[in-house]
Image (cartoon, grey):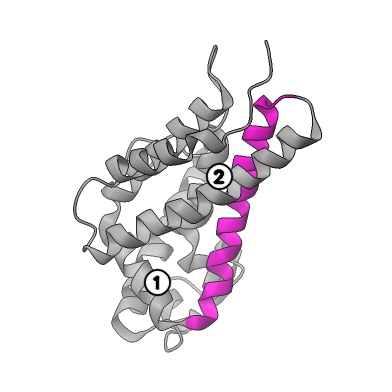
Amino acid sequence: MTSPAGLPLPGEPSGLRERKKQRAQAELARVALERFAARGFDAVTVEEIADAADISRRTFFRYFPTKEDVLFARRREQTEVLRELLARQPGEGAWAAVRRALLALAEDHMVQRERVLREHALLAQTPSLLARDLEWDRRAQEALAAALEGGAARDAASRRRARLCAGALVGALRTVIEDWIASGAKGDLAKRGEEALDLLSPLAPKERAR
């Protein structure tokens, strides 16, 4: 199973039940985002989302613990996919894996541009959601740091540099994405990402000798 841009999704369904669950989650996220975009996040209730999706309130909570979780369904999926993409291929260094993974996600952003624009507009209108948004950034940073540390030389300075580099990556890429969104999500986000990665590449820790 793949994302809209052809990225591998985590947790390949092992049976009909799991595939139905993924489809139901995707439909709930779609319905919820439509309601949020039309009326604002705070004005929409779980009951309204459930009714629009023709399910019960209880069933909604089988798929998403909170209303916030349904809004951040794409971020959750994206973070899980990032962890999978960061697995190094034979002969690939840690920085090369990070670069490949992040550019693949940039391609996925472009495929899902309308959804990204809607989500960003909701975040701008709803300050209470910003802490959750930053939490997903933190999880992405942890995944990037782990990937860079895994390929770094075995010393404290290299591990520290890996974490600093991961933080710089998340901050820079957030800026790149925000600038792209400000343009109406026009243009090649992957190309902008490549430029940012080129600037940040000197920060990557020294690779462990093989």
Q: Position of residue 29 (x, y in %)?
A: 42, 64
Q: Between residues 84 and 57, which one lies in front from this camera angle?
A: 84
Q: Amino acid at mark 2?
A: Glu
Q: Position of residue 81 (x, y in %)?
A: 51, 41
Q: Earlier in the sequence, mark 2 or mark 1?
A: 1
> Is 145 contained in the magenta span?
yes
Horizontally, residue 190 falls left or right of residue 172, namely: left
Q: Quarter of the image containing the C terminus?
A: top right
Q: Residue at x 48, y 48 (%)?
A: 78
Neighbours of disc 1 within 10 Å: few (<14), some (14-19), many (20+): many
The residue at the far bottom in this view is: 43
Spatial separation of the CA atoms under disc 2 and disc 1: 21 Å
Q: Amino acid at mark 1?
A: Ala
Secondary element type, mark 1: helix
Q: Residue at x 58, y 26 (%)?
A: 94
Quadrant of the rendered image containing residue 184: bottom left
Query: Which numbered disc, 2 or 1, marks the residue closer to the eye?
Result: 2
Q: Which residues are magenta?
A: 127-153
Horizontally, residue 50 falls left or right of residue 152, namely: left
Q: Between residues 201 and 34, which one lies in front from this camera angle?
A: 201
| Position above or below: 15 against 59 | above
In this figure, which residue is indicated by the disc labeled 2? 80
> Is 120 contained in the magenta span?
no
Q: Residue at x 52, y 76 (%)?
A: 129
In this figure, which residue is indicated by the disc labeled 1? 32
Dominant secondary structure (helix, strand or loop) of the stretch shown in magenta: helix
Q: Position of residue 165 (x, y in %)?
A: 59, 43
Residue 196 seen in the current view: yes
